[in-house]
Amino acid sequence: MHATDWEFRNRALVFGLILAFSFQFYFLDHNNAAEALAKPLAITLGTNSDLIVRLLLALGALLVAVAALLRTWASAYLRAEVVYAADVKSASLVADGPYRHVRNPLYLANVLMAVGMGALASRIGFFVLAVLMGLFCYRLILREEAQLAAAQGGHYEQYCRAVPRLWPSLWARVPSAGGRPNWAGGLKAEFWYWGMALAIVVFAITLKALAFFLILGVSLASFWLFTSWGKKKHPSA
């Protein structure tokens, strides 16, 4: 059930395709997920549904911001060329920062991002986005963990027994390995994720789809340029 070589090498592309595919369901379901949820909530709370919609969009933006922060924290303990490498880097095990709380903080962030971005999708699109992103991340996790277990042996098995796979622990489950975060590198690697959070914030304030797609487009284009540059600079990473 784990991801194929092609899926792992092109995981960024697949993430983008999942997002794009999920938003196409507006052709079948014209109801926005946030608006659909806001109507019954407005009746129950006795307030204006437009206010509830903006609050739900703000919650979506908060989830994407949390995802961006989590990915930045995780990337600060890994080099960007490792985070976006075309193959699994199994020579060493990182057990610092968020990796003391959850084994796969980068994929946990992607699931949070999918839920947050889903606030802008249709009702069907929200469901499709959350399910497909969760399944794909799980397949990637199985691949990475299998290769890490093969390379690290009992040391990695002990780490897996101590640290949860995807549901984070509030307390660190393993002692620090002494690694130091490179916050500048983490921000550089994940700046495009912050762009997605900004896109939702702007949409929640203005309700202008054009502004959302412009910011999102710039973020994704920047990500493509960054990863393309990284592959040229680190071809064997």
Image (spheres, rainbow, N blue to C red):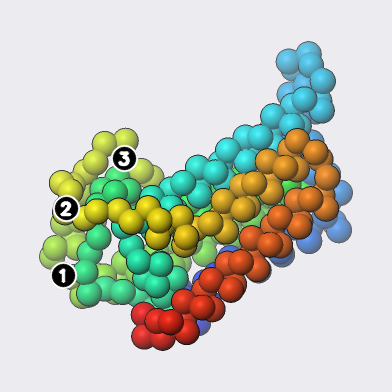
Q: Is residue 100 visible?
A: yes
Image: 9 above or below 132: below
Q: Which comes sooner in the sequence, label 1 or label 2?
A: 1
Could you give the CA–CA distance between mark 1 and mark 3, rounded to whole angstroms?
A: 23 Å
The mark found on residue 178 in the picture is: 2
What is the secondary structure assignment of the residue under circle 3? loop
The circle on residue 153 is 1
Residue placed under numbered mark 3 in the picture? 169
Q: Secondary structure at mark 1?
A: loop
Q: Position of residue 79 (x, y in %)?
A: 35, 66
The percent position of residue 160, horizontal first and vertical second, equals 23, 56
For image coordinates 45% across by 67% down, the residue present is 139
**Which dot marks residue 57?**
none
| Badge 2 amino acid | Gly
| The quarter of the displayed image where residue 149 is located | bottom left
* Residue that protrudes farthest toward the top in the picture: 46
Residue at point 73% right, 15% down?
Answer: 45
The percent position of residue 178, horizontal first and vertical second, equals 16, 53
The reply to whether the C-beta atoms of the residues labelled 1 and 2 are less than 8 Å apart is no
Q: Earlier in the sequence, mark 1 or mark 3?
A: 1
Q: Which is in the foreground here, disc 3 or disc 2? A: 2
Residue 229 versus residue 64 in the image, above or below: below
